[in-house]
Image (tube, rainbow, N blue to C red):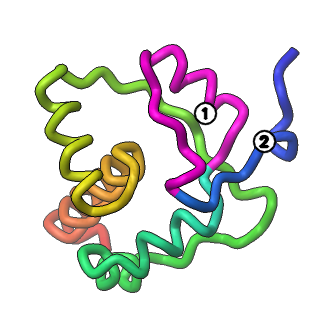
């Protein structure tokens, strides 16, 4: 039986995201959890992403806003490096990866005059 979006547990802190042993374990976690405003607010407070977050359209703050789990295969060395950077920054590697993707999408949108 699939869960409805309002049944998802909202994660507002990187501390609430466990370390996953496998990709399947991570997919199971994100099938029952969603990123909450606290995670996005933490990214906005980060010195690295504050200007970027301010330039983007504001994310709707409603219980109906949802995050879609995405599976991504990373090479072992890339994952190790990403986890190390995340540890140095005091965040989870999933959050850091999401920030990297957000920054890159923003740069491409600027380059293509989408925004």
Q: Is residue 24 left or right of residue 78?
A: right
Given residues 83 and 48, the one toward you in this image is: 83
Q: Secondary structure at mark 1?
A: helix
- Residue span colored magenta: 14-34
15 magenta-colored: yes
User: Which residue is painted at 61% across and 47% down in the image?
Assistant: 67
Given residues 48 and 19, the one toward you in this image is: 19
Task: State the quadrant of the C terminus.
Answer: bottom left
Residue 68, above or below 21: below
Residue 28, above or below 11: above
Given residues 52 and 88, the one toward you in this image is: 88
Q: Secondary structure at mark 2?
A: loop
| Dominant SS type (magenta) | helix
Residue where numbered disc 2 is placed: 8
Please state the horizontal and vertical placement of residue 23, each as a whole percent of the image: 44, 18
**Residue density around tag 1, few if under 14, some if 14–19, many if 20 or more, within 10 Å:** many
User: Which residue is painted at 65% across and 46% down in the image?
Assistant: 34
Q: Which mark is residue 30?
A: 1
Task: State the quadrant of the N terminus.
Answer: top right
- Of callouts 2 and 1, the N-terminal one: 2
Residue 40, above or below 27: below
Given residues 41 and 52, the one toward you in this image is: 41
User: Which residue is painted at 28% across and 52% down in the image?
Assistant: 87
């Amino acid at each position: 039986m699939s869960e409805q979006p309002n049944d998802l547990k909202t994660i507002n802190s990187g501390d609430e995201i466990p370390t996953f042993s496998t990709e399947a374990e991570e997919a199971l976690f994100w099938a029952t959890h969603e990123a909450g405003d606290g995670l996005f607010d933490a990214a906005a407070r980060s010195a690295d992403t504050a200007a970027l977050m301010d330039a983007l359209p504001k994310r709707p703050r409603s219980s109906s806003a949802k995050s879609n789990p995405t599976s991504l295969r990373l090479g072992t060395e890339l994952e190790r490096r990403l986890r190390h950077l995340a540890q140095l920054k005091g965040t989870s590697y999933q959050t850091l990866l999401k920030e990297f993707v957000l920054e890159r999408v923003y740069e491409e949108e600027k380059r293509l005059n989408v925004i």
